[in-house]
Image: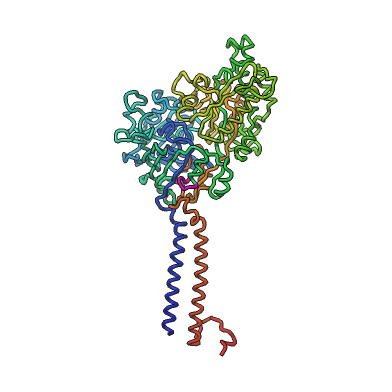
């Protein structure tokens, strides 16, 4: 009997131990180790990618960056938007000695390239020829890249990029550029061996713009998809589902921070397959992440407009942050009423203005109309009612900050300025200053109403279809302007190809500067993920006109040109930031664009993305988050219960097992004490002993 009882108890203990270990490992091991597997991430974006294209420099689209930033490396890269440090990538260096240097004139930059970096197609190795080829192409008017004017304005021509040896390049700038590392050396480098034989533009063959390298469509051995050196490689583009597929580059090169070895040592780089899917509309995107169809929703869905989803989803799976972003109304500064002002009522009533001999006076009347529009924008109402309080009223672009707290996001933010107030009386006064007679009957200037300004002031608001919140506030602004007596229409069109062709990168020279009714635009509702550094030169200098520059609104102002060129070339930081503040005062008065709000953004991610809050909050623009930094488990939204409560269940199982094992052990010992009178050393026995 004694042997049988002890055997049964022993078997029970062993069985329980095995169960505890099995159940515990089922919950704990996935929570701790599963992120090291080959995971998948699916990002949903409200805008299309590829949109403008996949070749760096041929696209100004934020949505394309979610793909191209993973395919291509620059010479330099920014570590994040918190510390903002520039790190060497293709440059052969460390954080302390990055591999680039500048001489005492601040004009001659020497860059040493990292050796042994393979292209995705296996060709070795990236070298100085690829770097020169990239910057020569971006400066070539034959390619007519949307950054041509910018790159050429900084570098000054192809002859200013020289190959010193196979792994050394020298840039000789015509004037210093304060943001050379941040805005030039971060350019994605393209392969000479793939693109060298392709024409920039062609009507008979496959050129750069129409190649699979740029479009992702029609890939073949003679027409390859994009080839870079980045952490992810091209797999394909499904036009039916509007989904790009990239896969991890397991031959990614090593460099001190964010190279392959560094990523792996930190337990990162576990996402093998990365998908970027275009889902139009916030409701559709929310349904997709709830159903486990995607893992991440991009910030441009404006999830702040869906408070019930935010509440249900939970703050642990949301990243919320003040972004380097703005939503604004871009004004066509060549528009005869809104821009040059030469067709305003006041100008037409003055012979010296009407005949074009006094453009400054005409421009002042155009500014009066823009100020009237700005006074009619209910910024705080838009933020409070349409965005649930997410955002701050905007002052100028591209300098971002909070005027109420005086906290800058962009260095150089002018805390002495405040947004235009919502003031319809001031708006009316500005319209009168521009020569317009206000309506005598209330009711507004609608399609069937005759209560309009005299003479009639007709404009069209151009609104992208991609952002439902923006469409809502565009309608609100339209109603406010109609209330003032303006004859205002509104047209909604997709970015690609319509808005790019009309306003941002018009290829037809006959469209540039034309009104909406002539094929161009009057006012464009648009948002930007801005550069981190205060550089208005690229957006507003008269040398940077679209389609080859970023001056989409075609502002030409000599005072502005002088200031932004000083900002661009001033290396001393305090002096430069003081100039930035002066420029903001100028832009605030001139209103080449009418800023509405600085964005406070939300990224939603499912429970498979275990470090989402930290990573998405540390990379807030202008490009998308580096996917290689995400820690992603194999489970998707369907495993939320276990992901959330697995450790608690495991702890409960262990506690219950301890109680059971302890009880059984106690019973076994009681049996032994009854039969032998033996107790273990140190065990206390009752003073009276058991009853007899």
Residue at the (65%, 29%) spot, across then down:
420
Residue 354 included in the magenta stretch of the image: no
Residue at the (51%, 68%) spot, across then down:
656
**Quadrant in which the C terminus appears:** bottom right
**Place of residue 668 in the rendered image (x, y in percent of width and height, measured from the top left):** 48, 80
In the image, 342 versus 573, the foreground residue is: 342
Q: Quadrant of residue 586?
A: top right
Q: Quadrant of residue 111?
A: top left
Q: Main secondary structure of the magenta part?
A: loop
Horizontal side, residue 464 vs residue 197: left or right? right
The single residue placed furthest to the front in the displayed view is 448
Image height check: is 20 above or below 95? Answer: below
Image height check: is 498 above or below 659? Answer: above
In the image, 61 versus 581, the foreground residue is: 61
**Place of residue 44 in the rendered image (x, y in percent of width and height, measured from the top left):** 47, 41
Q: Colour scheme in the image? A: rainbow
In the image, 602 versus 457, the foreground residue is: 457
The single residue placed furthest to the bottom in the displayed view is 692
Residue 569 in view in this figure = no
Horizontal side, residue 673 vs residue 199: left or right? right
Q: Quadrant of residue 445?
A: top right
**Place of residue 19 in the rendered image (x, y in percent of width and height, measured from the top left):** 44, 67
**Quadrant in which the N terminus appears:** bottom left
Tell me where the magenta segment starts and ends, as one range.
290-295
In the image, 491 versus 678, the foreground residue is: 491
Horizontal side, residue 331 vs residue 427: left or right? left
**Place of residue 148 in the rendered image (x, y in percent of width and height, measured from the top left):** 44, 26
């Amino acid at each position: 009997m004694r042997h049988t009882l002890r055997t049964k108890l022993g078997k029970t203990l062993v069985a329980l131990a095995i169960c505890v270990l099995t159940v515990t490992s089922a919950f704990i091991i996935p929570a701790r180790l599963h992120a090291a597997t080959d995971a998948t991430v699916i990002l949903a974006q409200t805008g299309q990618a590829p949109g403008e294209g996949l070749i760096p420099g041929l696209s100004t689209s934020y949505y394309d960056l979610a793909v191209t930033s993973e395919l291509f490396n620059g010479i330099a890269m920014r570590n994040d938007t918190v510390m903002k440090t520039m790190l060497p990538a293709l440059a052969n260096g460390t954080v302390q000695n990055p591999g680039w240097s500048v001489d005492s004139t601040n004009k001659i930059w020497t860059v040493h390239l990292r050796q042994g970096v393979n292209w995705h197609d296996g060709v070795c190795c990236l070298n100085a020829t690829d770097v020169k080829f990239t910057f020569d192409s971006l400066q070539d008017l034959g390619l007519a890249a949307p950054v041509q004017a910018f790159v050429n304005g900084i570098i000054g021509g192809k002859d200013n990029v020289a190959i010193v040896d196979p792994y050394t390049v020298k840039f000789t700038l015509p004037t210093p550029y304060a943001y050379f590392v941040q805005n030039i050396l971060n350019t994605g480098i393209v392969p000479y061996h793939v693109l060298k034989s392709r024409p920039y533009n062609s009507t008979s063959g496959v050129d750069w713009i129409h190649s699979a390298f740029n479009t992702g469509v029609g890939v073949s051995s003679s027409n390859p998809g994009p080839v870079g050196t980045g952490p992810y490689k091209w797999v394909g583009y499904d036009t039916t589902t509007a989904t790009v597929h990239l896969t991890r580059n397991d031959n990614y090169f090593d460099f001190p921070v964010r190279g392959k070895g560094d990523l792996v040592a930190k337990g990162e780089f576990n996402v093998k397959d990365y998908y970027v899917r275009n889902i139009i509309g916030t409701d559709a995107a929310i349904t997709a992440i709830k159903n486990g169809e995607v893992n991440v929703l991009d910030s441009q869905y404006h999830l702040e407009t869906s408070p019930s989803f935010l509440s249900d989803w939970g703050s642990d799976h949301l990243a919320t942050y003040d972004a380097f972003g703005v939503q604004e109304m871009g004004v066509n500064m060549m528009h005869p009423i809104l821009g040059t002002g030469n067709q305003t009522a006041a100008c037409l009533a003055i012979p010296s203005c009407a005949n074009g001999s006094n453009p400054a006076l005409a421009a002042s009347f155009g500014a009066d109309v823009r100020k009237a529009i700005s006074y009619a924008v209910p910024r705080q109402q838009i933020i409070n009612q349409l965005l649930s309080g997410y955002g701050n009223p905007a002052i100028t672009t591209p300098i971002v900050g909070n005027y109420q707290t005086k906290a800058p996001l962009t260095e150089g933010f002018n805390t002495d300025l405040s947004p235009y107030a919502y003031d319809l009386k001031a708006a009316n006064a500005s319209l009168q200053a521009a020569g317009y007679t206000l309506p005598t009957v209330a009711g507004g200037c609608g399609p069937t109403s005759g209560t309009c300004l005299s003479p009639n002031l007709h404009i069209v608001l151009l609104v992208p279809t991609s952002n439902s919140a923006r469409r809502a506030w565009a309608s609100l602004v339209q109603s406010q302007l109609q209330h003032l007596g303006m004859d205002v229409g509104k047209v909604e069109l997709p970015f690609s190809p319509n808005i790019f062709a009309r306003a941002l990168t018009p290829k037809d020279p006959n469209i540039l500067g034309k009104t909406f009714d002539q094929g161009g635009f009057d006012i464009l509702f648009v948002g930007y993920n801005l550069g981190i550094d205060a550089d208005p030169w690229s957006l507003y200098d008269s040398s940077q006109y679209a389609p080859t520059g970023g001056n989409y609104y075609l502002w030409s102002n000599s005072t502005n040109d002088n200031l932004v060129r000083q900002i661009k070339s001033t290396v001393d930081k305090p002096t430069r930031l003081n100039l930035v503040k002066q420029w903001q005062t100028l832009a605030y008065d001139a209103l080449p664009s009418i800023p509405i709000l600085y964005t406070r953004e939300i990224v939603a991610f499912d429970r498979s993305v275990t470090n989402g809050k930290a990573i998405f909050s540390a990379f807030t623009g202008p490009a998308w988050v580096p996917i290689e930094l995400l820690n992603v488990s194999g489970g998707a939204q369907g495993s939320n219960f276990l992901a959330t409560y697995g450790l608690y269940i495991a702890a409960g199982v262990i506690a219950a097992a301890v109680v059971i094992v302890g009880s059984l052990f106690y019973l076994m010992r009681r049996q032994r004490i009854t039969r032998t009178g033996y107790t273990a050393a140190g065990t206390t026995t009752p003073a009276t002993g058991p009853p007899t």
